[in-house]
Amino acid sequence: MVTQEVKYNLYEDKQNSELLAASFANRPRVVLIHPSAGVCWSGGSEIFAIELARHLTPYFEITLLSGANCGDFSRISGGIPRSDVYNFVRNPLIAPFVYRFATHPDILIEHLTNFLPCLLYLLTNPVDLIFPCNDYGGLMVAACVRAIKGTPILFTEHVGLMGNGRSLSRNLKFHPNKLVVFSSEIAEFARHQQPNQAINIIPNGVDLSHFTPEGEKIDFGLSGPIILCVASLKRQSHKRVELAMQAVSRLSSGSLLLCGDGLDREYFQNLGEELLGKQRFAVRSFSYDQMPQVYRSADIFTLPSIDEPFGLAYIEAMASGVPVVATDDAMRRYIIGNAGIVCDVTNPDIYAQALKNTLERDWKILSRENAMRFSWEAIASMYRDAILETIYPNQKQEN
């Protein structure tokens, strides 16, 4: 089970910490960094940055350095978002050159072009804490500012242990003042790399007012029941979408709606039609604002990924009253709880039976109640305390 492992008490009466934070004469100023926020609405870290910034505004003076306007708290970062160069770097004439230097050249370009604008902003404005949300690009900026001004850094590791923890190992070299991870397993890995690293375990959050069981639904033009899978469409990905396609093909009824986009969309389209036919399979793309309708229009949500750091789509589905069938691992068991079934998704017959069993029950109330554990209000309060502890370390009291 994932818990908030690092316990602390910033004030004698923790129940009043919210009032204390909000009543500071000069509220601490926190700057979050994510140059794709507001531009890309399909990425978990982008949604995280926007939602967290919004829910922290009652406690702090918040600025989100973003790629587009996300609200009153956001400010355009000044560089090039990765989505603006996505197609350019994949041009057949360009790709052979740029991919020699970077696995993800679009992300590298975003990091490089946003470095100086973000650095200048942070050096010329008063900041009490820097919260990079865009991996090593934001960490590089934050580390430079800390070296000059001493501004502390709080960083959430979104990639987890994917790639045997390669990204986490790299990011730990920046020595954030506070590291937030999603599970005790990730925390143990980080402590093995950096024994003195301060770590909090805080899960991801979901907007319960945005994702609800009630509201408009979408007719996908498929034969029911509808099994939904939300994932980027890339072959040999940790999402393992092919496993879901194989399992659904073993059911006597029901359709698979694959919601997403990516380089291999045509491959998945062809494979799905081959396994299920056009009446039982479709690939569709929807905007972020449409996703609540998409979720609540499905009967089951499934995502058979491996090494998934958290999985925002799971809690979005449950908040919409939809049960989940997923990989049987510690993180999925914690997230899904009693709102679905975890199983050996690598066995298509076992996976198909789990889907069939899930369809035989009404999970709406259980799914919604389970998702309430991850409400942004609750998650933001954990981050509020972690931020205050990082800014005022001398007030930390170990329990």
Image: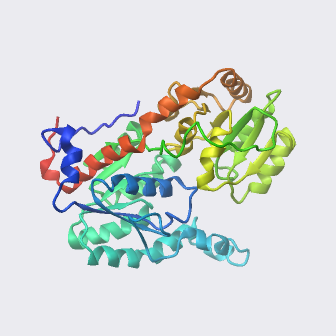
**Where's residue 342, x and y in %?**
59, 28
Res. 256 image quadrant: top right
Q: Residue at x 14, y 43 (%)?
A: 11
Decide if residue 240 is in sight here: no
**Where's residue 351, x and y in %?**
69, 28
Judging depth in this view, the residue of 122 and 344 nearest the camera is 122
Left or right: residue 135 versus residue 395 is right
How is the structure coloured here? Answer: rainbow
- Relative to 241, say whether 35 is above or below: below
Q: Split into 4 quadrants, where in the image is the C terminus?
A: top left
- Relative to 51, say whether 242 is above or below: above
Left or right: residue 282 versus residue 238 is right
Decide if residue 231 is in sight here: yes
Res. 363 image quadrant: top right
**Where's residue 175, x and y in %?**
30, 58
- Relative to 301, say whether 139 is above or below: below
Left or right: residue 35 versus residue 250 is left
Judging depth in this view, the residue of 46 and 319 nearest the camera is 319
Q: Split into 4 quadrants, where in the image is the N terminus?
A: top left
Res. 294 image quadrant: top right
Q: Residue at x 19, y 54 (%)?
A: 23
Q: Residue at x 25, y 67 (%)?
A: 127
Total tally of numbered discs in the picture: 0
**Where's residue 249, x and y in %?**
80, 34
